[in-house]
Image (tube, grey):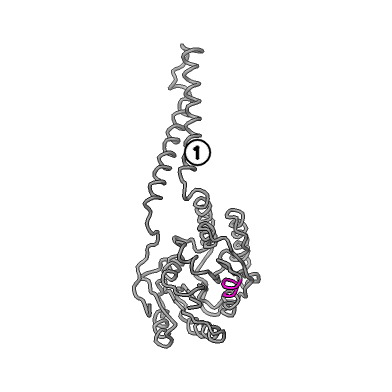
């Protein structure tokens, strides 16, 4: 199979038929063998009924339905596990991503031998205040922190080789950072393509300003995982050693001062340096324990994705 198209969605019943017909037209005109996997992330409208009808009409369409809304990362993870294509395309279901981009994305993976190609919505049809400016700030911080030179990390339109999607583990809200996750797994051939962005035709966006707050928090997480995810003791151990050293220096100073300099002076427990020494050594010990626990968890970690599939169609 040439292409698997993975489409997570939440309450997009009005756009699904049009999106399916558009993708099918592009695939057939380019003679691709393909599958379209819709992942219904707990929709409360008639999205699943629409998917059922599409499955009945088109054998290339497959569906996964969650019991409730788990988030885009979990939806992508479930779709990635079921893909059979050599190239996997992800796109949003709101018709803002253009399926006409698929052939060139496919060629960049196959002919240029890239591991991943990320779309760049250079011209956006979104609110400048609520989306464009926060997005620019977010992408700048992501580039500086991760070292991956992309203009638009959050673009839903991306292409992957099958090796990438079978190797990475997308969990939490890490779908924004799939290129970083791929890089951490050794897939460094990452490209970018300017793609057409279209105004939303039906409904309204499911994301608010909180996604940027969550995005920056996730950015800190991905930075830490990238630097110390496979060696947490290097981070916590270094901090623990520093704190223990500071505490030991204060304790040594207090001991020497009490024994040799001012033996008749204040009690050690009456001096502020004592509490600095005590606090830093306790914190240092806690950092060491955190490092050990991190190493233990790392060696016994299990799949971080938690979602319950209600139904599958044609899978």
| Residue at the extreme bottom | 57
- Tell me residue 8's x, y (percent): 46, 72
Task: Indicate whether 38 appears above or below 246.
Answer: below
Residue 100 visible to the viewer: yes
- Tell me residue 98's x, y (percent): 58, 78
- Tell me residue 230's x, y (percent): 46, 50
Frontmost residue, 223 versus 109: 109
Frontmost residue, 227 versus 212: 227
Q: How many marks?
A: 1
Q: In which quadrant will I find the C terminus?
A: bottom left
- Tell me residue 208's x, y (percent): 52, 65
Q: Is 186 covered by the magenta stretch?
A: no
Task: Indicate whether 219 appears above or below 236.
Answer: below
Which element is circle 1 on? Answer: helix
Q: Quadrant of residue 313?
A: bottom left
283 relative position to 23: left or right: left
Residue at position x 41%, y 46% from top? 295
Frontmost residue, 309 versus 258: 309
Q: Is 109 covered by the magenta stretch?
A: yes
Residue at position x 49%, y 12% from top? 260
Q: Mostly what secondary structure, the magenta segment?
A: helix
Which residue position is annotated with label 1? 238
74 relative position to 19: left or right: left
- Bounds of the magenta segment: 106-111
211 relative position to 310: left or right: right
Residue 212 visible to the viewer: no
Task: Indicate whether 291 appears above or below 266.
Answer: below
Residue at position x 58%, y 74% from top? 105
299 relative position to 4: left or right: left
Circle 1 residues within 10 Å: few <14, some 14–19, many ≥20: some
């Amino acid at each position: 199979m040439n292409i698997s198209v993975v489409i997570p969605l939440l309450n997009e019943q009005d756009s699904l038929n049009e999106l399916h017909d558009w993708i099918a037209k592009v695939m057939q005109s380019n003679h691709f063998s393909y599958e379209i996997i819709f992942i219904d992330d707990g929709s409360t409208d008639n999205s699943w009924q629409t998917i059922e009808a599409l499955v009945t009409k088109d054998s290339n369409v497959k569906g996964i339905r969650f019991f409730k809304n788990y988030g885009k990362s979990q939806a992508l993870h479930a779709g990635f596990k079921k893909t059979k294509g050599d190239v996997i395309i992800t796109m949003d279901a709101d018709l803002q991503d253009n399926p006409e981009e698929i052939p060139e994305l496919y060629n960049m993976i196959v002919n240029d031998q890239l591991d991943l190609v990320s779309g760049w919505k250079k011209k956006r049809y979104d609110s400048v205040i609520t989306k464009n400016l926060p997005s620019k700030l977010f992408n700048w911080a992501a580039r500086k922190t991760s070292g991956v030179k992309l203009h638009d990390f959050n673009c839903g339109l991306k292409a992957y080789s099958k090796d990438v999607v079978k190797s990475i583990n997308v969990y939490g809200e890490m779908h924004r950072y799939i290129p970083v996750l791929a890089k951490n797994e050794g897939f460094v051939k990452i490209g970018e393509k300017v793609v057409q962005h279209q105004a939303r035709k039906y409904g309204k966006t499911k994301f608010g300003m909180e996604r940027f707050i969550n995005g920056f928090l996730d950015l800190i997480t991905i930075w830490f995982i990238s630097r110390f995810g496979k060696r947490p003791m290097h981070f916590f151990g270094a901090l623990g050693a520093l704190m223990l050293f500071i505490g030991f220096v204060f304790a040594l100073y207090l001991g020497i001062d009490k024994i040799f300099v001012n033996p008749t002076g204040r009690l050690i427990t009456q001096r502020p340096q004592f509490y600095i020494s005590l606090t830093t050594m306790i914190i240092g010990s806690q950092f060491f324990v955190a490092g050990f626990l991190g190493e233990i968890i790392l060696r016994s970690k299990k799949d971080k994705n938690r979602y319950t599939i209600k139904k599958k169609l044609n899978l």
